[in-house]
């Protein structure tokens, strides 16, 4: 069924005259007449009773008129919705964010993006790297911001955004407070609080084991706020990324011998085409000043 035939039919219904309907649709009268005849052939019956000066709907035509009107209006709604989507007026975007990334790194980006593109509805979905990779590959999220202690799968494209050290967190009054940096060997015998969602958890444990450092695992939690509060309460120490949102009462120092870094990347599926909203956000992420004003000096962070 040709949508133009429907439009011509509705124009004849409105004008009750083939010539005026043709003028309204900006086509010739013979062309409009052929289109109506083709529509009648497709419907299996006459839609109009043609008279010299006035045209009347048949019973079949009267039956189909509201249905054809609904089809045309539906197509108009579809076009308008597509236009809003392509013009970023009513677009949805799902961004996976690794749950250990500190929110203050992204507040400026999100605020600026919302100001420039108010029509894009942005949803942040937190998760560990393995889960985010599954969601990304399945198309349930559009892009991901994350790091991995091992190599990313080949099916992903990576854009490095910034590097971030791991620091040691401990309570006020701890014996390590006087050190500007904490060598890994100084941690031997300490009570350790395990951040279950840390993607470098196994890497850090192996690093300590290789240097003969024995940690006493006291507690484990998926929640960053619980771990930090337990550290501040004197229940142990932990490794955390340096750009984490740190609660009052927590002391942090860079870890050395060796330093441990992670690289946070923008991750997309190789070969997958971006929607306009995704392309706009990817461009905003890539152009954002990730390295400017990222970290506080050690003295200020430890205060």
Image (cartoon, grey):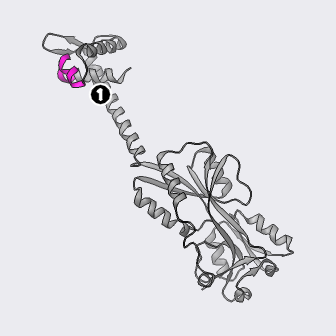
Q: Could you tell me which quadrant the N terminus lies in?
A: top left
69 displayed left or right of 92: left
Who's the residue at 52% across and 62% down the image? 288
Q: x, y (%) of residue 217?
A: 78, 73
Q: x, y (%) of residue 90?
A: 40, 48
User: In the rendered structure, does residue 173 fall within the stretch colored magenta?
Assistant: no
Q: Is residue 99 above or below residue 171?
A: above
Residue toward you, 283 or 300: 283
Q: x, y (%) of residue 175?
A: 74, 88
Who's the residue at 58% across and 82% down the image? 248
Residue toward you, 66 or 280: 280
Is residue 31 visible from the viewing direction of this image? yes
Q: Which residues are magenta?
A: 13-25
Q: Could you tell me which quadrant the C terminus lies in?
A: bottom right
Residue toward you, 56 or 219: 56
Quarter where residue 77 is shown? top left
Q: Main secondary structure of the magenta part?
A: helix
Q: x, y (%) of residue 42?
A: 37, 13
List the single residue furthest toward the left. Answer: 53
Who's the residue at 27% across and 21% down the image? 8
Disc 1 marks which residue?
A: 69
């Amino acid at each position: 069924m040709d949508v133009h035939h429907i439009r011509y039919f509705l124009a004849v219904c409105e004008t009750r005259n083939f010539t005026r309907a043709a003028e309204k649709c900006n086509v010739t009268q013979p062309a409009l007449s052929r289109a109506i005849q083709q529509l009648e052939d497709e419907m299996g019956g006459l839609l109009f009773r043609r008279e010299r000066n006035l045209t009347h709907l048949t019973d079949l035509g009267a039956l189909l008129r509201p249905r054809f009107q609904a089809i045309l209006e539906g197509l108009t709604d579809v076009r308008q919705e597509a236009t809003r989507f392509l013009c970023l007026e009513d677009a949805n975007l799902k961004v996976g964010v690794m749950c250990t990334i500190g929110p203050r790194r992204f507040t400026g980006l999100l605020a600026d993006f919302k100001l420039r593109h108010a029509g894009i509805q942005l949803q942040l979905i937190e998760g560990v790297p393995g889960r985010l990779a599954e969601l990304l590959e399945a198309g349930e999220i559009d892009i991901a911001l994350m790091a991995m202690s091992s190599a990313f799968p080949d099916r992903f494209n990576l854009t490095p955004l910034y590097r971030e050290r791991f620091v040691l967190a401990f309570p006020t009054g701890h014996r390590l407070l006087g050190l500007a940096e904490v060598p890994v060997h100084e941690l031997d015998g300490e009570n350790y609080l395990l951040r279950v969602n840390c993607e470098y958890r196994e890497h850090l444990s192996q690093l300590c084991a290789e240097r003969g450092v024995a940690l006493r695992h006291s507690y484990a939690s998926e929640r960053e706020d619980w771990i930090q509060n337990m550290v501040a309460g004197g229940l142990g120490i932990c490794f955390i990324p340096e750009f984490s949102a740190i609660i009052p009462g927590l002391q942090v120092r860079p870890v050395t011998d060796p330093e441990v870094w992670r690289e946070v990347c923008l991750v997309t599926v190789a070969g997958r085409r971006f929607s306009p909203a995704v392309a706009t956000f990817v461009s905003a992420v890539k152009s954002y000043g990730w390295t400017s004003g990222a970290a506080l000096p050690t003295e200020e962070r430890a205060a």
